[in-house]
Amino acid sequence: MKPCFRFNQLLTVILFSSLLLVVSCQKENSLDSAEELEQQEASVLTSEADAEAEIVFNEVFDETMGVNDEVGMEGVGSLDRVNPNPCYTVTVTRLNPPDLFPVKVVIDFGPTPCRGLDGHYRRGKIITVYTGRLLNPGSIATTTFDGFYVDTIKVEGTHKIENTSSSNTTRQFTVDVTNAKLTKPSGNFIEWNNHKVITQLEGLSTPFVPLDDVFKIEGSANGRVQRGRLIAAWESNIIEPLFKRFNCRWIVRGKIRTVRRNTNTNGPWVAVLDFGNGTCDNLAVVTINGVSRQITLR
């Protein structure tokens, strides 16, 4: 006997199948949309993290260079030398006396937050060993940290500066940051490794006036960042040289291209961070998949 299949049953099957198709499509679209949002969020996050690490360790460069004239060039960085009672101490230890070098310099901001000229609070120690004065070709400064915080961010890792100038009439530094970690009170973190070449473009004719110094920065970095539930790893390259002035805390010009690791380097989720046209401010523009948004740097 043939099965009896009435029209209303067929209609029910069709409607049910259609409903399943609609729900399935909606679910797929929803997943696609959620994935796109996460990709975009991760791209912005990695670009911001790379910029934040860049700023923190640019400050380390300034402090290492500017602690005093014996090892660098006093007057740069955020140390408050005008205050007769600063909230930090500087200890100089000769490692092979009576030779001037190598020398260990410890900048100790103390156990409680110490406010710098830039308005940020620091505590803990920056410890640097110099093989010679950093303005001389071949000299190296290696910096580590002991309980060091900028505001509420704990700073760890190794920062190395080498003067790779070809002569005393030029000035170039190679800087390597290895195993760096910036940890926030929430547990969120940034892990970072960086290699760059810093070339001085302006201010060479006024060696005792560092505030007119302008540097060009080129190089690359990689890292990993956690913010809440999201963890993302990235690689970045400076595609237009960055420009840093000693009289400005932020990068004033240049572009960094950031790509998440293990993703398509030509895909839409590549972030380009633009630091602007030379104005000293904490604003930058990040562009992802053709869409730009302004961000505020720390």
Image (cartoon, grey):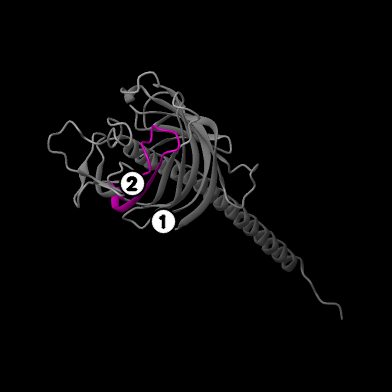
Q: Residues within 10 Å of mark 1 (few under 14, many from 20)?
A: few
Label of residue 228 in the image: 1
Q: Secondary structure at mark 1?
A: loop
- The quarter of the picture where residue 213 lies is top left
Answer whether residue 149 is magenta in the image: yes
10 Å neighbourhood of mark 2: few (<14), some, or many (≥20)? many
Point out the image quarter for the N terminus. Answer: bottom right
Q: Quadrant of the C terminus?
A: top left
Q: How far across and down, in percent of the image, does residue 168 sit? A: 44, 26
Dot 2 or dot 1, earlier in sequence: 2
Q: Amino acid at mark 1?
A: Gly
Query: Which residue is at a point 65% across and 55% down the rendered structure image?
Result: 25
Position in image of residue 15 (x %, y %): 68, 61
Relative placement, left or right, of 68 versus 6 is left
Q: Which residue is mark 2?
A: 128
In-front residue for pair 131/277? 131
Q: Which region is colored magenta?
A: 127-153
Q: Does 44 sit above or below residue 156?
A: above
At horizontal 33% and vertical 43% (from top left) the residue drawn is 101
